[in-house]
Image (spheres, grey):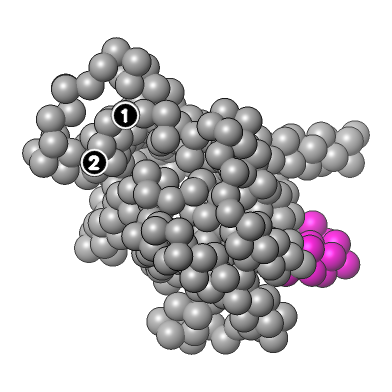
Amino acid sequence: MHDGRASAEHILGICLVAGSAAVFGLAGVLTKSIHADPLTINCWRGFVGGLLVTAYVLYRRARSDNPKSSLRLGWRGWLMAAIGAAASIAFIAAFKNTYVANVGIIYATAPFVAALFGWMLVREYPRRITMMAAALSLTGVAVMVTSGIGAGRPFGDGLALLMTLGSALYMVLIRKFRDTPVVWAGAVSAFMLFALGWVVTDPLAISTRDANLLVAFGASFALASIMWTEGARLIPAAEAGLLGSAEVPFAILFAWLFLAEIPPVASFIGGAIVLAAVFAHAGFDWRSARRTPIALSPEI
């Protein structure tokens, strides 16, 4: 009976993480379908997503063993929230200035950049397989970015690189500041984007069509975040990482289906190199994890 329950939870975890990758993959399509500027998109995406993530945080807190635990962020949490907000601004702006495929593939290198930051900040020495995959993936990114210069899209590719650096740094800070309520910091980051957009832009000057899409964007962001958080609790980290890598193919597929967006040949070549490195590395971790007993992710 216990084995059956564990198996059901494992299948549920797989479905949730894979589903979150598919929902995350819609970000490029939604961004390019909305006519508003990047800050306005971040404003309303942050407001809707922040409310939903806050509701989730309060729900999880009420069901935890310590329902009165503090949500105080401290300077560490505020730093993480600020970095997350900056990365989100670059993320949305990148979609507006280059191909969805380029953004997704460049972002796929974030775990390798995080390994570099981990070595620099917390002295976590990367494994040889990680260094080899990182070198291969950076070669693929170089092919794409070089092509982007010739195609007049270097600004968008540069924003995608900036977003990847911010996201990688955020990953490292999660490990470094283990006592910080990470999901709550994400909600605060979303509200920071709402406040910034409200001050800098005119968020009310949007069409009804854009308003509907912005609500859907914010809801999809919250849904994907919650699905990932819940799913990652039920399966090994290596398996979650492998399934999460599917976000990139989903993003490219959706851009082709809904936007008829076909990137240049160099993007396909560079993307194939990056995805080969990402999936090979994730597959290695997954195979290694299968040789050891399954350990469920801890509560966040």
- 118 w.r.t. 57: above or below: below
Three-letter amino acid code at disc 1?
A: His
Q: Where on the picture, by quarter, is residue 184?
A: top left
Instruction: Indicate yes or no whether the magenta region holds residue 200.
Output: no
Instruction: Indicate yes or no whether the magenta region holds residue 288.
Output: yes
- Nearer to me, 289 or 83: 83
- Expressed as whole percent of the image width and height from the top left, the position of residue 273 reads 69, 67
Q: Where on the picture, by quarter, is residue 108?
A: bottom right
Between the C-alphas of marks 1 and 2, the distance is 12 Å
Element assignment for label 1: loop
- Expressed as whole percent of the image width and height from the top left, the position of residue 236 reads 72, 55
**Segment colored magenta:** 281-294
Magenta residues: mostly which secondary structure?
Answer: helix
The quadrant of the picture occupied by the N terminus is top right
Disc 1: CA contacts within 10 A as few (<14), some (14-19) or many (>=20): some
Extreme-top residue of the structure: 208
Three-letter amino acid code at disc 2?
A: Leu
Residue shown at 24% from the left, 41% from the top: 39
Name the disc covering residue 35, or none.
1
Element assignment for label 2: helix
- Expressed as whole percent of the image width and height from the top left, the position of residue 105 reads 57, 57
Disc 2: CA contacts within 10 A as few (<14), some (14-19) or many (>=20): many
Q: Horizontal placement of 69 versus 202: left or right?
A: right
Which one is in front in this view, the residue at disc 1 or the one at disc 2?
A: 1
Residue shown at 22% from the left, 21% from the top: 206
Q: Where on the picture, by quarter, is residue 177?
A: bottom left
Residue 191 seen in the current view = no
- Expressed as whole percent of the image width and height from the top left, the position of residue 43 reads 25, 35
- Nearer to me, 148 or 110: 148
Residue at the disc numbered 2: 39
